[in-house]
Image (cartoon, grey):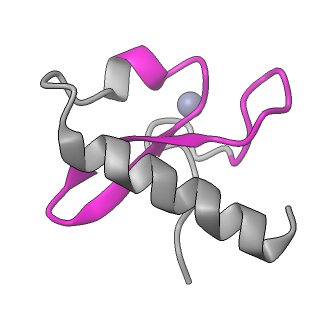
Amino acid sequence: MRDRRCARCRKTTSPNGAPVVVVAVEDGRDVYACADHRQELASPTGDLLVTIAQYQDMARRRRAGR
Ligand SMILES: [Zn+2]
């Protein structure tokens, strides 16, 4: 099962209740972060892979109806 948690604090949602988002891709795995740790964990290069991973993640959520 996909580990959709903040890579730093292991929470599945941000303090405001929004779900964690993909902020980086490491070794082919999506790295998620809450709002508090997004800046800290974000890929410094603003990687195209990250952008693609974010779209894929959103698409999966839509299919799941969440
Ligand atoms: Zn966090």
Is 4 placed above or below 10 here?
below
Residue 25 falls inside the magenta stretch: yes
Q: Determine whether 25 is above or below 15 in the image.
A: below
Q: Is 10 located above or below residue 41 in the figure?
A: below
What residue appears at the point 60 percent right and 31 percent down from the top-left corner? Answer: 34
What percent of the width, then of the height, locates residue 2? 53, 75
Residue 40 image point, x, y percent: 35, 18
Q: Quadrant of the C terminus?
A: bottom right
Quarter where residue 53 is shown: bottom left
24 with respect to 60 (left or right) = left
Q: Out of 55 and 28, give the one closest to the viewer.
A: 55
x and y, in percent, of residue 20 in the image: 63, 41
For the record, the magenta segment spans 12-39
Counting every numbered tag in the picture gives 0
Task: Tell me, yes or no, whether the highlighted magenta stretch contains residue 26.
Answer: yes
Q: Residue furthest bottom?
A: 1
**Ligand 1 quarter of the rendering:** top right
Asked if residue 24 can be seen in this view, the reply is: no
Confirm whether residue 1 shows in the render: yes
Q: Which residue is pictured at 48% across the width and 61% down the height?
A: 56
Q: Residue at x 12, y 25 (%)?
A: 45
Task: Return the residue nearer the eye: 5 or 48.
Answer: 48
- The one nearer the camera, 12 or 58, is 58
Residue at the image point whose x is 29% and y is 64% from the top:
29
In what quadrant of the picture does the N terminus appear? bottom right
Q: Position of residue 23 (x, y in %)?
A: 39, 36
